[in-house]
Amino acid sequence: MKNIFALALFFPFSLFAQTTTFQWQQVAPGVWKATVGKPEKLTLLGVAEIQPRVEALQKLGTPVFPNELKQSTHELTDGKAYLRFPLHKDEQLYGLGLNFKSVQQRGTIKTLHVDHYGGKDDGRTHAPVPFYVSDRGYGVLINSARYVTVYAGSAVRKDSKSPPEEMNRNTQKNWNAQPYSDAVDELVPAPGTEVYVFAGKNAMEVVQRYNLYCGGGTLPPKWGLGFVHRTPTLFTDQQVLQEVKDFEQKGYPLSIIGLEPGWQSHAYPNSFVWDSTRYPQPKPFLDKLLAKNIRANLWINPYVSSHSPIYKDILPYTASHTVWVGVVPDFNLKPARESFKKHFTAQGVDLGVSGYKVDETDGYDRWLWPDIARFPSGYAAEQVRQTYGLQFQKMTVEWFRARNQRTYGLTRATNAGASAMPYVIYNDYYNHKDFITALCNSSFIGVLWTPEARSSKTAEEWLRRMQAVCFSPMAMLNAWASGIKPWTYPEVAEQVKEVMQLRMQLLPYLYTTFAQYHFEGKPPIRAMNLVEGFADAGTVVAGKFDATDNPYAMAVRKDIKDQFMVGDYLLVAPLFAEEPKRRVILPQGKWYDFYTGKYVGGGETIEVDHSAGLDKIPLFVKDGGIIPMIPATLHSPTKDEVLPLTVRYYGAQPGSFNLYDDDGETFDYEKGNFGWTKLEVKDGKGQQLPTQGREWRYGKVSWEYMTR
Amino acid sequence: MKNIFALALFFPFSLFAQTTTFQWQQVAPGVWKATVGKPEKLTLLGVAEIQPRVEALQKLGTPVFPNELKQSTHELTDGKAYLRFPLHKDEQLYGLGLNFKSVQQRGTIKTLHVDHYGGKDDGRTHAPVPFYVSDRGYGVLINSARYVTVYAGSAVRKDSKSPPEEMNRNTQKNWNAQPYSDAVDELVPAPGTEVYVFAGKNAMEVVQRYNLYCGGGTLPPKWGLGFVHRTPTLFTDQQVLQEVKDFEQKGYPLSIIGLEPGWQSHAYPNSFVWDSTRYPQPKPFLDKLLAKNIRANLWINPYVSSHSPIYKDILPYTASHTVWVGVVPDFNLKPARESFKKHFTAQGVDLGVSGYKVDETDGYDRWLWPDIARFPSGYAAEQVRQTYGLQFQKMTVEWFRARNQRTYGLTRATNAGASAMPYVIYNDYYNHKDFITALCNSSFIGVLWTPEARSSKTAEEWLRRMQAVCFSPMAMLNAWASGIKPWTYPEVAEQVKEVMQLRMQLLPYLYTTFAQYHFEGKPPIRAMNLVEGFADAGTVVAGKFDATDNPYAMAVRKDIKDQFMVGDYLLVAPLFAEEPKRRVILPQGKWYDFYTGKYVGGGETIEVDHSAGLDKIPLFVKDGGIIPMIPATLHSPTKDEVLPLTVRYYGAQPGSFNLYDDDGETFDYEKGNFGWTKLEVKDGKGQQLPTQGREWRYGKVSWEYMTR
């Protein structure tokens, strides 16, 4: 101690910053907030303008503050905030952004930074949400629009009360490259931040609370859940209409047609004006599509061309730097938002455009403004980068809301607070397995992701990608560059059609699953780690020493990241090209083949091989599972369409399913215009209980008892 | 303008920060310094304790301040410094850290961050030196120990006076994903920084000035340039002595034997104490090696085990966090440095240890302290990370200097100001081509790099790697993990021996080349872009569109990064496994085959194929080139050894070579105890002019006129 005091005399200014505990304040049932230092004005939740669903949160219960986090501390130093949250030895962590390679995040280090995903789970991704969920039933959110660095159980303090054992690598074979760390450490490069804690009896309940606090998950329009096809970039109106006709004639479902940059007179940067040669009459063109019950979605990015009619208006509200020579609007300023709103309402929304694909808000670093750019709102370029995608989504939603019209679009960047945003993330990366891992990870952080099909080397790969995307928040073929069609590979054209049709048949189930997202906060796609009865903590495999690739013989955790649940009952285990069989981990309970109703196992790992029929994507249903289905329509049902309902029931356990319905297009559900109808099987008999609420759009209900 | 003023009223606090020009002050001939905001106390050059070689700088000339940089500006905002340096349209930039994939850096974006190189030239590397060199004859150094972000001609300002043309990607085929940017923008995340500018008539002179300002390049001991072999980690003294004997008996040169972690009783973390079972008598063991004229180099990393005798002493001067459970000394504090000095002097240097391999100061992020760690000196973890390798080098050099003894070791981390450090960078990465690119890049930033041979899949690869490493600052076989020997592949054992012997024969040339580094600032290894008569600006190849891998059809610049010069005369074009031929770009003038003296071309691209003899690494000598050589000794010559000298002369032009010599071991050269002897060929006759200075260690001088 003497030495320490002597040192303190020499370095009195700096030696030990004040380390203090948090002052937690309950802000909603099961949700607490604390303030560290001086939080900045621009925050993630602030930009998202979240509106907590207080009633739903109350319904979810009123847990106490998580014991695990009571010893959390923070300090301010070097102009930054350092936060420390304790960890138990066997605790698992999920979340921390849209990762593509790993589900379990304990032991990882990330700087959460809006960027195009570059192949490493290092925090640079489209949704670098600074939120993690613990399997011990809590979640921690850093509400900062800065590049937050997270040491998710990697940093080891000298004064730890549960320090790891010191080992000798020379002689001890079990020497571990990553000694046990008893905390998550976070570095917020700002003079302060808000921190939120979400409680829950398990990881799922934590995620629910997070989503509900952020306004509840988005409820897409029904047409948003149909099939989406994006046409080559320079297609004309006639080519688009022909493409639509081809889908129809060949019997492939289609609900949204996406137009790429060529709809504009100038793009990269954007005029935001219809090109008069390719689209001479936008309104009649859009009307023709709408008459076929097909929506148009328009590609844009935010960078304004000098040829745009809004250029002069917006110029004073743009950043110091350009992107592809286009000016960069500062949407933190109302005049910038108003300028966009006025133009896009008149030239897009009012003409019948249903939504937008908002490109290039993520960066790749070089296709964005630099961090030294200045924004007229005075916010730092870093803060604007972390929130730009979020800001843009929020803005467009309002254009449509003004018409009481839902939208459903695509974004390349988002962040915390996005649960209620009707946007699905996509990117240029294209590893099929990693795309599925991202699907799993989207469920922890309140975002939606589509593993879009874009092209394929082989017919088999094409089928595998098309199968998987049909079990995602947006079933999309993005042919902007390839011009590929669903039927391009004749060998698999029928199987592709079949899975697209299955997507349409499942719409009642999918729509209800999204209603759960909205009303209960349960994500539509669910990583296995959120599923009851799934207790796999991943297998830690001893590191294989390699002087170049693994010189510290670092152990590897084998995640379950290639299967997931859609809603309460459906387990999806996608197949991948050139892998004629795969293993599937079934949670506790009994599980049945979706197609045949046959029992396949429970609480065990099974292998799916050719004998199970590789033409189909492996799908499994939980015992007692009820799956309501409609006929395979070519388009998503309209609000006036009444369709017969087939209710599939699997297994032997009593089961029930609350089928949600509303008009599928407007925000009238917010005024109570929706209905929940209980479908129930008891004593081997199915029944439909009286609808709670006004909405119900089905004709004849038939029951199919799949398990005999 | 009206809008701007209106806006300024709403956001008066933030809109336009003061943008000012620099106040440059000349600090040495051709070197200027400016201060932005409030520079921090800990700087790169400060840690390196550089001692500018003022006389040599004077000798190099007194250029005026570069015109190109007169319009440079800076501003302070968001607690950070933003710097902007103009760029011409056709200007090329080099440097910006030890990059492994690219030589030309214009258009790149990097956050310069000490780290293990992770496969991307993104700024995370072992020597993230914030220094760039322009082919227009100047260099810019940011003397900050922070993670500096550099936009090396990628950011485009809205108010640029030479803005890029706005294009329409829809219709213009020559649309460019990367519009012209007229500046380098740098972001220093600190309230201020020092900036240095180095002038020069070309890139080489800029580099010379930088190196001379940093104290001149290091002059290794002669034994440092011999062959280095590192033994498997748990070798005993007897095994090491046997290994030495094997080298001797088989006739393979050896000057340094490296001991890996197993020399210690505890490692990872370190006891820094000889293991009593593997090395019961260190002094006699080291004496035996020295008697054979072989030096011992010891592996260490800085993290202190509780089993180390210095643990208690150093504990108060260590960081808040541990690395592999070892404490992390804060070498900014004198007691920490003293504690290491005392221990390592007694237990290492005084016993006869010649140098150290300092491992794991780079990070991989997870094998270092986190950025939230606190250091008792009060410096931020980020600052300590950027300077730790530099600090450690500086410290060890002093242990040896106290004995008037040079050292030559290995480091995994360094930074700006390292020119005078007798340390060579190595890492775990192992791509042979990228290793050569790093060799080229090392020449711009005052560091040394070894493309160590570690293992190989095939005999051919082994030969290629061993050939290349023999033309690097440290000719090293690092067998710590593989146990491989130079002769392991019998098919190439003779060719490997031959190139190792050639390395020994070239020692007079190599040692002089290092003397040029020290006295004139010319790097020993030189990227082609530093070579007179080499004017290749790289070929810009139009980007091949690919929706996944290159969605913006970004153009690619083909660098010349697989060949380099060693010293003034020798051009090295390494071969790579499975590539039976390669192209070599010969600068202006005439070039001759090193082995045969035959003319091969000049100012052109030639192809080297099997007929040229693939057993040897392709080497070319400039017209008039003089290469002094000694016989292939097994060990580097001692200070008392007198050897015959063979002087090879190539081509027909009059030529000369100033052969440097000194005792090769001590710092007596700093007191003037060195000699330069001019070897000259005029009118077809070679002569040796009287030695300037006292030192000359050669017997008979014979001339070999290689070109007949």
Image (tube, coloured by chain):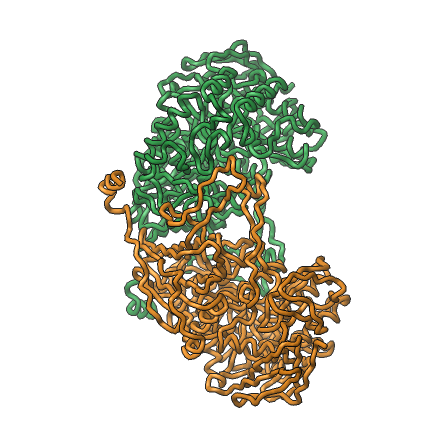
Chain colours: A orange, B green
Most extreme residue toward the top is: B700
Most extreme residue toward the front is: A683
Q: Position of residue A585 (x, y in %)?
A: 63, 62
Relative placement, left or right, of A373 versus A561 is: left
Question: Along the line of sight, which residue is nearer the eye, B612 or A79?
Answer: A79
User: Is residue B201 at all visible to an observer of this figure?
Assistant: no
Quadrant assignment for the N terminus of chain A = top left
Q: Position of residue A228 (x, y in %)?
A: 62, 73
Quadrant assignment for the C terminus of chain A = bottom right
Q: Position of residue B372 (x, y in %)?
A: 37, 50
Relative placement, left or right, of A605 versus B420 is: right
Q: Quadrant of residue A591?
A: bottom right
In the displayed structure, A233 sits above or below B323; it is below
Please report the residue visible at 47 percent of the width from the left and 12 percent of the height from the top.
B640
Exactly how many numbered labels are in the figure?
0
Question: Along the line of sight, which residue is nearer the eye, A461 or A59?
Answer: A59
Most extreme residue toward the left is: A9
Question: Along the line of sight, which residue is nearer the eye, B87 or A99?
Answer: A99
Question: Along the line of sight, which residue is nearer the eye, A153 or B86?
Answer: A153
User: Is residue B129 at all visible to an observer of this figure?
Assistant: yes
Q: Position of residue A72 (x, y in %)?
A: 36, 58
In the displayed structure, A345 sits above or below B552; it is below
Relative placement, left or right, of B684 versus A73 is: right
